Image (cartoon, rainbow, N blue to C red):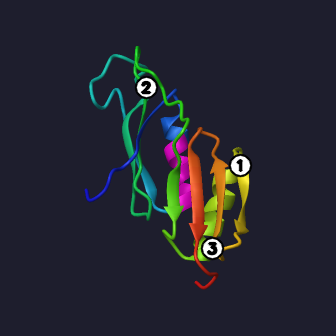
């Protein structure tokens, strides 16, 4: 691992979230249940550990176990500035917007770069942008 990777503790939506992120970013979601890990601190079919593979974005998630606090995101954004070609970033912005809330449309700024912000349907705040418009 060469950089920090978000690990989300979700309120029973880890399966749905990782599947959604795999669809948005590409790749696939690897999902392991509480039952597979021999855990009894939550429903057997809850996700004990999941992650994205074979795609450009690294992300881990699990369902919060009994007594754990699930994700509540404020004051932090996940930045995808220049992380891919502009057309790909536009697609990611559109995908993350489905069921979410656009905070600021993806737009060209006075200094020439483009960026925008969206809070996806799982509560993650994303900053997506790029320089220029060449793929």
Looking at this rendering, what residue extends furthest in the bottom direction? 134
Label 3 element class: loop
Q: Earlier in the sequence, mark 2 or mark 3?
A: 2
**Front one among 88 and 128:** 128
Q: Quadrant of the C terminus?
A: bottom right
What residue is drawn where x is 46% and y is 61%? Answer: 27
- Based on the picture, tell me whether residue 130 belongs to the magenta stretch: no
Number of callouts in the render?
Answer: 3
Q: Residues within 10 Å of mark 1 (few under 14, many from 20)?
A: some
Q: Which one is nearer the viewer's eye here, 106 or 90?
A: 106
The residue mark sitting in front, 1 or 3, is 3
At 56% from the left edge and 43% from the top edge, which residue is drawn? 124
Residue range (magenta):
17-25
SS type, badge 2: loop
**Residue nearest the observer in this picture, 58 or 19:** 58
**Quadrant for the N terminus in the image:** bottom left
Q: Position of residue 63 (x, y in %)?
A: 44, 30
Residue corresponding to mark 3: 113
Q: Which residue is mark 1?
A: 103
> Which label sits on residue 64?
2
Mark 2–mark 3 contact, CB under 8 Å?
A: no
What is the crowding at mark 2: few (fewer than 14 residues within 10 Å), some, or many (at least 20)?
many
């Amino acid at each position: 691992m060469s950089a920090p990777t978000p690990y989300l503790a979700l309120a029973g939506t880890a399966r749905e979230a990782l599947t959604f992120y795999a669809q948005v970013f590409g790749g696939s979601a690897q999902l392991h249940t509480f039952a597979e890990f021999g855990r009894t601190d939550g429903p057997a079919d809850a996700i004990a550990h999941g992650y994205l593979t074979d795609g450009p974005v690294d992300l881990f998630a699990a369902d919060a176990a009994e007594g754990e606090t699930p994700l509540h995101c404020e004051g932090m954004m996940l930045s995808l500035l220049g992380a891919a070609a502009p057309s790909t970033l536009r697609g990611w912005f559109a995908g993350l917007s489905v069921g979410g809330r656009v905070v600021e449309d993806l737009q060209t700024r006075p200094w020439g770069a483009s960026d925008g912000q969206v809070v996806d349907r799982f509560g993650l705040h994303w900053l997506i942008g790029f320089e220029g418009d060449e793929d």
